[in-house]
Image (cartoon, rainbow, N blue to C red):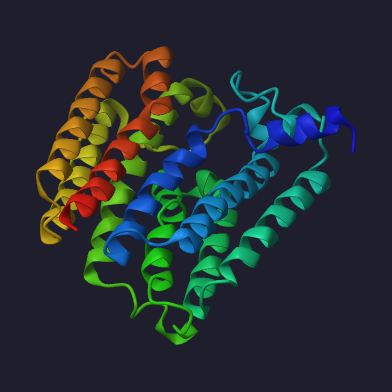
Amino acid sequence: MTSGRFSLYLDLIRWNRPAGWLLLLWPTLGALWFAAGGWPGWHLLAVFVAGTILMRSAGCCVNDVADRDFDRHVKRTAQRPVTSGAIGTREALTVGAVLALVAFGLALTTNAAVIVWAFAGLAVTIAYPFAKRFVSLPQAVLGVAFSIGIPMAFCAAGGPGVPAGEWLARVPPLGWALLAGNLGWVLAYDTEYAMVDRDDDLKIGMKTSAITFGRLDVAAVMLSYAVYLVLWSVAGAGRALGALFFMAIAAAAAQAAWHWRLIRGRTREGCFKAFRLNHWLGFTVFAGVAGGYLLRT
C-alpha cells in the first residue's frame, strides 16, 4: 500500500477529525465506570476505547458509500474520498468490514451478551445512513447507534460468564436511564450539525432534525441538553458520586449555555463550532463520573 493510499484511508475514516469518536467514547466510558462501580480494569478499558474508534471508523465507511450521491451536492462533503471517486465503493466497504471484524474480535474477549449487543450495534450503524431518506428524526437513529456502548458496558462488567440470553436482563434501570440521557445529547449535537447543512439538505431532499424542528431547532437542542444532564445527574446522585461530580455537571451545563449563544443566530460557523466542541462537554461529564468514583473509594 502506498503512502498516498493510506492517507486516503485515514481521510475516509476521519482520522484527522477525532471529535466524532470522542463523542461516542465519553458516554461509553462513563457507563463503563457506572457498571463497574469505578475503575473497570485495563482489559475492558482497552476493549471499549479501541472498539469505539474502530466502529466509528467503520461507520464512516458505510455512511460515505450510502451518501455519495448526496454528498457531492454539499460543499462541506463534496471532497470526501468516496464522493470524489478517489476511493471506490467496494474498496471503502472492504475497509469498513475489516475494521468491524477487528472490533468484533475485541468483543469476543468479553462475553456472549456483549457479542449480541455488538451485532445490534452493527445493524443500527448500517441502517443509519438510509434513515436520513425516510425518518424525520434520523438523529434519533444515530443516537441509538452512539449509545449501544452503554448496555454493552453493563454486560461486559458482569465478567466472561454472562450468556447471550441475558443481553437485556444484564442492563439495569440505571443503564437504560444513561442510554436515554445519551440519546438526548446525541440529538442536541447532531441537530447542531444538521443546522450547518440545512439549506443544502432541503435542496437535495435529505431529512434531518434541523429541518423537522424548523424554528424550534434551538429550543429543541437546549431541551435535549437538559434531558441528558438531568438523567446523568440523577444517575450520579443515585451512586453518591459527590460534589466533584455535580461540579462537572454544572461545568457541562455552562458549556451547553455557551452553545446556545453559538447557535441562536443559526449561522453555519456558530452551529459547526458548537457541534465540533461538544466532545469537551462529554469529557467533562465523564471526568465527573470517574472523579466521583475515585474520591468515593
Q: Number of marks in the image? A: 0
Extreme residue in the right direction: 2
In which quadrant of the rendered image does the N terminus lie? top right
Instruction: Let me know if residue 138 appears in the view.
Output: no
The residue lying at 27 percent from left, 57 percent from top is 178
| 204 left or right, relative to 230 | right
Question: Is residue 180 shown above or below 190?
Answer: below
Question: Is residue 203 shown above or below 284?
Answer: above
The residue lying at 49 percent from left, 72 percent from top is 114
Residues 73 and 124: in front is 124
Q: Picture quarter containing residue 70?
A: top right
Residue 17 % position (x, y): 56, 29
In which quadrant of the rendered image does the C terminus lie? bottom left
Question: Is residue 251 shown above or below 229?
Answer: above
Residue 86 % position (x, y): 82, 30
The residue lying at 14 percent from left, 36 percent from top is 247
Residue 43 % position (x, y): 50, 63
Residue 256 % position (x, y): 23, 29
Residues 195 and 155: in front is 155
Instruction: Let me know if residue 190 appears in the view.
Output: yes
| 187 left or right, relative to 81 | left
The residue lying at 80 percent from left, 34 percent from top is 6
